[in-house]
Amino acid sequence: MEVINISFHGVSGLLASLAAALLLWVNQERKYNNRLLAFILVIFAIQNFMFILLSSRLILEMPWMLRIFAPTTFLLGPVVFIYTRSVLNDELKFRKYDWLLLIPAVLTLINFIPYYFLPIREKISYLNTSFYKQGQIHDLARGILPGKLYYLIRICWSGIFLFLNFQQIFRFRKKNTAELLSKNKLLLNWLMTFNGMLLLVWMVTILRLINPSFISSNLSIADILLGATILFVCLQLFFWPQILYGVFKPISTIIIDQEIAESKDIPSVQTLSNTVHSDDMAEDTEKLPLTISPEEQLEYKNLVENLFREKRPFLSPDYSLEKLVADTHVPRYILSAFINREYGMGFREYLNRYRVDFFKANLNDPLWDNFTLEAIAEKCGFNSRSTFISNFKKIAGQTPSDFIKSSLGSRL
């Protein structure tokens, strides 16, 4: 039975690692969401790894490993919450105060300092008495906090985020149209399944705390169920390749930069597509909603990136959003919303990032050795030396001159 359990968790951990790798290196469409989900899967893989070490008693050969990953158990709830929120709200980056959710993980690290500094022999003795001695309650924290109090806090912490996750999903269902919900059916099914399995593990963990005899062999049913959950979640990802490989991109209401309208009323899409406005229009106009399908999002991405890669329009100092509209034949308000959603920045910053990358790529060109900084700025598509320096520093974090010096230094 023990061999079966170890094999089961080994397969589960490998699948979680594989899915995380695919999200990080194959799926390049929604990097922020994918990295969050990959991090969750890495935590799952770590849980499987620890299960194998404990059940095979290999942990006795490396007892220092026991509490190394304990902080990840306090990270799982917040990361799943941020992942669910980011997918439903189509977020591209962390919010300002998300870092506060890391505090319990840091406190957990502090809590287990007594165990970290135990001599190896005492750690082995602790493992033998707390995990492998028949009739004993398993896994007695051995930190600053008493064992039951530590697990109670962990359960409450995870429970708060599970509640918030389902609340987010139900609010999304309630506030959106039937058409939008229909288009997001795959997404919502995935989020409900994912959080539903985590809820099941959470409930069994509560039973384990209430009734310590709720144990199978030397390993708790909660641990076995966690392995089954990880396996099930990974299989769901492989059955839904749209999520794993990036074919599917969630739809949500996009907030457009209000350069596109002079009034609060939108008469029709045709009227908007025929309306041209300057880049300097006032920013205090009310924001307008727009829905872009996943297929359209991918189409615009390929269209814009191929244009910039092949024709390099960004090298023209007077290249504007209006000219991009003319080159792509996509309405201005759609392009503005697309760039904001896909890249998390406005058109000007998007344009300047290409110019900065062009400078970096051509820095070693011998012909550039005879150019002044003004000439280089013009070559890269900037209007002036000062504009080049200010934008380069904003994007690269240093001036062009400092970058050149550091590049030369790295080659010496």
Image: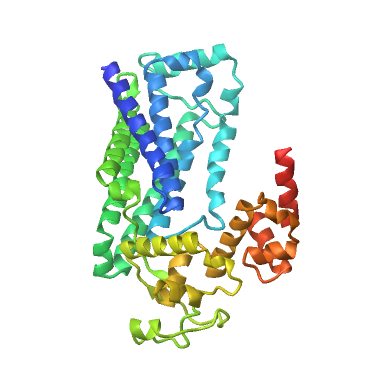
Residue 212 in percent (x, y) is at 35, 27
Query: The N terminus lies in which quarter of the figure?
Result: top left
Q: Vertical placement of 225 versus 170: above or below?
A: above
Left or right of 29: which side holds 380?
A: right
State whether residue 200 appears in this view: no
Q: Vertical placement of 283 versus 102: above or below?
A: below
Residue 198 in percent (x, y) is at 33, 42
Query: The C terminus lies in which quarter of the figure?
Result: top right
Q: Vertical placement of 91 versus 273: above or below?
A: above
State whether residue 173 appears in this view: yes
Q: Residue at x 44, y 47 (%)?
A: 36
Q: Residue at x 56, y 50 (%)?
A: 99
Viewer-nearest residue: 386 or 228: 386
Q: Residue at x 26, y 53 (%)?
A: 189
Viewer-nearest residue: 1 or 255: 255
Q: Residue at x 45, y 32 (%)?
A: 148
Q: Locate residue 18: give its quadrant.
A: top left
Residue 243 in percent (x, y) is at 32, 49
Left or right of 335: which side holds 239?
A: left
